Amino acid sequence: MASVRTWVGIALAAALGISMTGCSSTGGKRAEDARKAQAQGKAAVDTPRWTIGMVTHSGDGDTFWDIVRSGAEQAAVKDNINFLYANHDEGKEQAQLVDSYIDKGVDGLIVTLAKPDAMKAAVARAEKAGIPVITVNSGSAESKEFGALTHIGQDETIAGEAVGDELNKRGKKKALCVLHEQGNVGHEQRCEGTRKTFKGQLQNLYVDGTNMPDVQSGISAKLQADADIDAVVTLGAPFADTAVKAKADAGSKAEIDTFDLNAKVAAGLKDRSLGFAIDQQPYLQGYEAVDLLWLYKYNADVLGGGRPVLTGPQIITEKDAAKLEELTKRGTR
């Protein structure tokens, strides 16, 4: 096997999506060997087998977090990492899971800060124990304050602003922002960002995201009560299809738009039952978090200079649907 130092460049190039084949024939062969090793479930480095734990605020069965986890697991194979994963949608229980990984003596932690107040003490305990932490997806504003190395994800306010701009381009006048998880600071930031740039009226609708019939009836009732609503923005891919059904129930002509992407969203963009989606590239969030912890452990590298490393927002429409539909089937978009 090539030296670890040789593989550092390859691993970093892979993490940032940089092709090394143009450097030299030898460099191209080494990069290809690394990709083959990864595909075969083999590590591309011979660094110690460090253990990294990821704890997210995901509820069970959330396809978005399946993609995040898939990216993290793929990077873990390449980087010879023993990868652990746990999740809970309640902040207190999520913090307890982080504590359990600290007690196990993991070498690095990846956490989400959807409910930062509940997570602050757990992240501080990890820092005190000398365990490096990277935050992903939510909590970009709190990440540095809590002592994390960096944050990987999209800036939720900026993402919301992109939605507002897109609604303006589409001539929308009255929109509904559907929040499916009360207390999630990232969701509030998305709606506030949309309100900041949207020239029309924006209303918030709070629903119980763990109860899809409740989500559907809540959106339907709102659309029936206000025929002037011409756009509905859901904050997660699983809720977009439910919003489409609610629209049909209400006999509404509102456009359904959403944050995040999955196979159903790609299909909805393709058949135009959805207008557009905001993709934050969850696979990249998981992959980069593991890869950057590996780089920190091996080479004391920290990407971002103290600022969040952005993976979105990317506005996708029907013109992107065909290609993205292929990628969603393999679980990477």
Image (tube, rainbow, N blue to C red):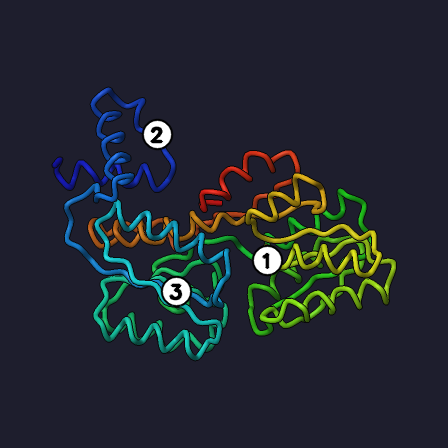
Pointer 1: residues within 10 angstroms few (<14), some, or many (20+)? Answer: many
Residue 96, horizontal then vertical, whole percent? 36, 78
- Quickly name the residue at label 3: 111
> The disc labelled 2 sits on which kind of residue?
Ser
Q: Nearer the viewer, mark 3 or mark 1?
A: 1
Residue at 83% x, 51% y: name it: 253
Front one among 163 and 323:
323
Left or right of 135? Residue 4 is: left
Residue 318 vertical placement versus 217 (above, below): above
Q: Is residue 61 left or right of residue 317?
A: left
Q: Quick one: SS at disc 2?
A: loop
Query: Is residue 304 found left or right of 265 in the rendered image?
Result: left
**Residue 135 at x, y = what percent?**
40, 61
Instruction: Tell me the distance, in whole angstroms, between the alpha carbons under discs 1 and 2.
Output: 34 Å
Q: Secondary structure at mark 1?
A: helix
Q: Is mark 3 in CB contact (under 8 Å) with mark 1? A: no
C-alpha span from label 3 to label 2: 29 Å
Q: Residues within 10 Å of mark 3 (few under 14, many from 20)?
A: many
| Residue located beneath label 1 in the image | 238
Whole-number angstrom distance, CA of label 3 to CA of label 1: 22 Å
Q: Quadrant of the N terminus?
A: top left
Which of pointers 1 and 2 indicates the residue nearer the eye?
A: 1
Q: Residues within 10 Å of mark 2 (few under 14, many from 20)?
A: few
Where does label 2 land, which residue? 19
x and y percentages locating residue 95 in the rendered image: 39, 76
**In this rendering, position of residue 86 left or right of residue 295:** right
Which secondary structure lies at badge 3? Answer: strand
